[in-house]
Image (cartoon, coloured by chain):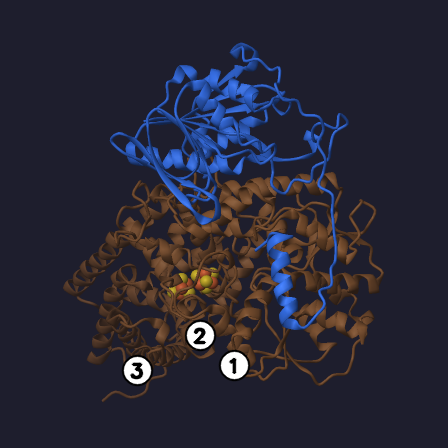
Chain colours: A brown, B blue
Amino acid sequence: MTSLSATLAEPQHFSLPEKLLFFLLLFASIWLFWRRFGPILEKILKSRKDPDFRLAPIGRRIWDFFTEVICQVKVIQQRPLPGLAHAFVFWGFCAFALVTLNHAAVGFGVGFLDPAAWYGRVYFYLAAAFAIACAIGIAGLFIRRFFVRPRWLGKKVSNESGVIAGLIFLLMVTYLAAFFTTDAAPAARLLWWIHTLTLLVFLPLIPHTKHLHLVLSPATIFLKRDGFSHIPPLVGDEDFGLVAGKDITQLVSLQAYSCVECGRCSEHCPATNTGKELNPKEIILGMRGYLNGPGPASEQAILAAEDGTAYVSQKAVFQCTTCGSCEFQCPVGIQHLPIMVGLRRGAVNTGTWEDDYGAKLFNQLERGSNALGISAIERDKFIQKQELPLFDGTQEYCLWLGCMGGYDPKGRDIVAAFARVMQHLGTSFGVLKKEKCTGDPVRRLGNDLVFQTLAEENLKNLAQNKVKNIISICPHCVRTIQEDWKAYGTPPEIEHHTEFMARFADRLQPIQSQEKIVFHDPCYLGRNRNVYDQPRQLVQITGTLIEAPRHRERSFCCGAGGGLAFLGEETGDRVSHTRAQELVATGAQTVATACPFCNTMFRDALGEMNGTAPQLLDVAQLIARNLDS
Amino acid sequence: MKIIVAIKQVPERDAQVRIDSSGKWIEESEVQYAMNESDAYALEEALQLKEKHSGEVVVVSAGPERVGTTIREALAKGADRAIHIDCSDLAQRDALGSARLLAEAIRGENADLVLTGLQSDDLGYGQTGVILAELLGVPHATLILHVEKTDAGLKVKRELEAGWFQEIELPLPAALTIQSGGNKLRYATLMGIKKAKTKEMRVVSAADLGAAATPVATLQSIELPKKQRSTQIIEGDAKAAAATLVEKLKFEVRVL
Ligand code: SF4
Ligand code: SF4
C-alpha cells in the first residue's frame, strides 16, 4: 500500500528500452509541434515589416508585459471569475515549467531537483499548491465552456479545448498523486509515464489549436504598437492599406495567429450586439484564414465584394464604429483598429468600396468644407449671431468649432454654452474665420487622399493664424487633430472642453441638486483619451451622478463613430437606440454627454422613445445652466 | 468611343470672395479652387460611357497653372489623358473666347463626343458648350441628364422646365452639355492620384492656339449680392392669412 510520503515520488533507474522509447516519443512530439509551428513562424516573419515599428519606449512595453502577462491584470479585470481561473492556470504553468524540465530530465536519469533536498521540497510543495489552483481553475473553465456556455464563445464550442482542459487536469492530478506514493512503488512509474505521455500529447496540440496563444501572446503583448487605435503611415507608391497579403505586416500576422477566440471583443462590440454582420473576432480569424491560405506574399484580395470568396467581409468591415472596445478588451494584445481601418483603406484607396453615402461624403469633403455638406456661409452666420470673437493671435485659446459645432443646431448650442462658461472664467478665446473638417470621418473610413488634403489645409490655416492652443467640444476633433494630423505636420496643443472646465471646477458655482444625471462616456474621450474623471467631476457639481451598467472603459458606443454617422440606415437594431434604452433604464432625469455626435444620436433615439424621455445635455450645457441660475 | 470633356476650375463652393481693385473680378489669391460641379457630372458621364463601350476619355481645361490640380483630379477619377490650355485671362474672355480656345485645342482630336457641364459656377454664361459645338460643326443638345449609345448615335434625356423631360436622338459626333445630378459621382482615390502622375498632360499656350481673345461682350463690373431683408405681417384670420401666405410664397418669393 502506498502511504503519504513527504516528498514527490520519482521512479528510479529507467531501463534502456524505456529510455529509448521516451526519447523517440519526445522527438516525435517536438517534431509534430514544429511541423505546424515552423510554418506559422515563417508566415509571420515573411510578412512585410511594420514601417513605423520602434521598440521604444521600452519601459511601457516592460510594464505592459508585467501587468498583462505576468499579473494577468486585463484578463482578470475585465472578466473576474473566468479571468481568475485563467490566471491560476497560467501561474500554475509558470510554476510548472521547472517541474516539467526536471520531470523530463529524470527520464534520462539526470534529474536536477532532488525531491528529498530542502530546495526540492520547497519547490515541489510550491508547485503543488499551484497545481491545485490550476486544476480547480481549468475545471472551472471547462464547466463554463461546456455547461454555462456564454453566448460570445460562439455557437459551436470546439471539442479540442475540452481535450486540452482534460490534458491539463491530468497533468496536475498525476503530479499531485505522486506525493502519495514512493519512489520504488510501481505506481510512481505509472504516474511518471502518464504524466509524460500527457505532456507529449499536449505539446503538438498547442500550435494546432487556439492554445497557440501560450507561445505567441507574450510576444504579441510585448510587441504591440504604441498608441490606441493607431493608424500606421502608408509608405511608398504601392501602399494603399490592407489590400492583399503583400500588405499584411508582421505585427498583423503575429496578432492574427495569437487570437485565443475568447470572444471578449465580440461581447463588447456594438455592431455584433445589434445584429450586424460584423464580429471583430471573425475579422481576426479571417485574417488568419487568409494567412493560412494565400499567405503573406499573395496578391489575392483580402476583401472581395460580397461574392462569398472573401476571407473578410467588406460589408462587415464598414459596419465598425471604431469605438475601440475590441482593441481595449483583447487580452492578448490584438489591435483591431489598425486592421479594421487598414482593410477600409485598402478598399477606399483603390476604389473598390462602392457606397452612395460614402461617395457623397467623400465628394462633399473633396470640394466643400464640412462633412454635413452645408455652405460655409452658415458657419459665418452662426458666428455673427452668437457674437463669437474671431481669433486674431492675441487670445489664449482657439475655440475649434468642428463640423458639428459649426453647422449642427445641437452642436451649436453646446458651443454657445461652452463660450458662456469661458466668458464666465474670463478666458480669452477666438474662433477661426475659416475651418475645414478635421477629416475624422474620412480617416476612419480609410480615405487617405481626402484626409491628407484636409489635414494639410487645416495645419496651414492654423499656422497662418498662429494658433498655439485649441479647445474643442468634440472628442473626434481632439483625437484627429492631436494624433492623426501628426502624419502631416505638428498640430497645436489641443484639449477637450471637459478637461479645460475640470481645471476650474472650483470656480464653476457648484449647486446642491438631487437631479439624477447619468453620464455617457464617448468612445473618443474615454478609451481613446483616457478622460473619465473630468466630466464626472463636472456632472457632480450640477447634480447627482449615476452610472449606466456599462461605463468608463466598458462604455457602449452611440453608433456614430467611424464615419457611420454619414452612412445609410443600419441593419439590425440601431446602436443608438440600444444605448439610449440602457441610459434611460438607469432612471436618470438627465443624460449628460460630452460629444456632439453622441448628442445627435441620442437626440434621435430619445425622440423616438415612448413615455417621457430624460433631457439630454452636454456637460458644458449643465455647467452653463448653473451659471445662469 | 473617344470622348472629350471640357472642365473648368472655379472658386470652391464655400469660398469667401472679395472683389479685386479693378472691380471686374475677384481677388483670386484668397480663394481655393475646385472642379465646376456640372463638369464633374460631365466627366462621370464620360467615364461611365467608356466603362460600357470602351474607348478613351480626354479632359481639356483652360486656365493658369493652378488648373493642374483639377486636371489631376479628373485623371485620378479615370480620364486617360489631358490637355491643359495655359492662359491667365479666362475671366476676361466671353463665352465665345473660351469656346474658341477649347475648339482649337481639341479640333485635331476628332472626338466622337464632346461633353461639357451645363454652365460654370462662377460666370454662369451657360453658352460655352453650345458655341463649342458650333465651332466644331457638330450637333448638340443641352441640359442632359442621361446618355445612351444607340447604333445610330445617341439617345439623350433633356431636362425641361417644371419637371418635364424630353428624349431626343442625335448622330455622332456630337456635343452635349450635362446637367448636375444625373449620375452619382465617384470619389477620387489615392491609387487614382498615384496613377494620374504617369498619365499624359499636354500643355499648350493660348497664344499657340491662335484663338482671338478680343471679347465681343465685355465684362463691366461685378458686385457681391446685397443682403435684403423685408418683413411683412399678414393680417386676418388664420385661414385667410394662410391663403395669402401661400400666394406670396408662390408669386412674390417664388419658393413654392
Ligand atoms: S471598434 Fe467597436 S464597432 Fe468596431 S469592431 Fe471593435 S468593438 Fe466592434
Ligand atoms: S481578438 Fe482578442 S478578444 Fe477577440 S477573440 Fe481573439 S483574443 Fe479574444
Q: Is residue A284 above or below residue A121?
A: above
Q: Earlier in the sequence, mark 2 or mark 3?
A: 2
Labels 1, 2: one chain: yes
User: Which SS class for mark 3?
Assistant: helix
* Residue A423 in view of the camera: yes
The x and y percentages for residue B73 are 49, 33
Amino acid type shown at disc 2 = Gly
In the foreground, A256 or A236: A236
Estimate the spatial distance between the alpha carbons at disc 3 and disc 1, rounded to whole Å.
39 Å
Which residue lies at the image location 43% right of the left edge and 41% below the top edge? A240
Labels 3, 1: one chain: yes
In the foreground, B77 or A510: B77
Residue furthest left in the image: A17
Chain under label 3?
A: A
Q: Which mark is residue A147?
A: 3
Task: Assign the N terminus of chain A to one quadrant of the image.
Answer: bottom left
Q: Is residue B61 left or right of residue B222?
A: left
The x and y percentages for residue B182 are 42, 43
Chain under label 2?
A: A
**1 vs 2, front mark:** 1
Q: Residues within 10 Å of mark 1 (few under 14, many from 20)?
A: few
Q: Is residue A18 above or below residue A547?
A: above
Chain under label 1?
A: A
The x and y percentages for residue A169 are 30, 77
